[in-house]
Image: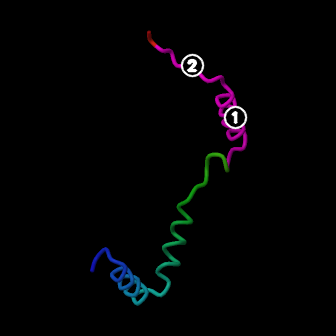
Amino acid sequence: MAGTKAGGKLAAQKNLAKNPNFYAEIGRKGGQMGHTGGFAANPELARVAGAKGGRISRRKKTVAKTEA
């Protein structure tokens, strides 16, 4: 039954039987491991990246050359 929906329910029941706070602890550990970076931490980086994307999207389309 491994890998099925029924097997997943049995596994969840077993985890909760061993530790009623199993999923809460897993979620807490995951939250502590997260370190948000990128645009959330650096608005100036977001501004620069947006400006680059804006310039690229406004470039003229290249015309495909046809060979005769």
Q: Count the marks.
A: 2
* Nearer to us in this view, 17 or 47: 47
Mark 1, other Cα within 10 Å: few <14 / some 14–19 / many ≥20: few
Q: Residue at x 61, y 24 (%)?
A: 61
What's the CA distance linking mark 1 and mark 2? 29 Å
Give the residue at the far top of this rendering.
68
SS for dot 1: helix
Residue 43 location (% of width, % of height): 72, 44
Mark 2, other Cα within 10 Å: few <14 / some 14–19 / many ≥20: few
39, above or below 17, in the image: above
Label 1 sits on what residue type? Val
Q: Quadrant of the N terminus?
A: bottom left
Q: Please give the residue where the numbered disc 2 appears in the rendered image.
A: 63
Q: Residue at x 64, y 29 (%)?
A: 56
* Nearer to us in this view, 18 or 43: 43
49, above or below 3, in the image: above
SS for dot 2: loop
Which segment is the magenta one? 41-66
Q: Quadrant of the C terminus?
A: top left
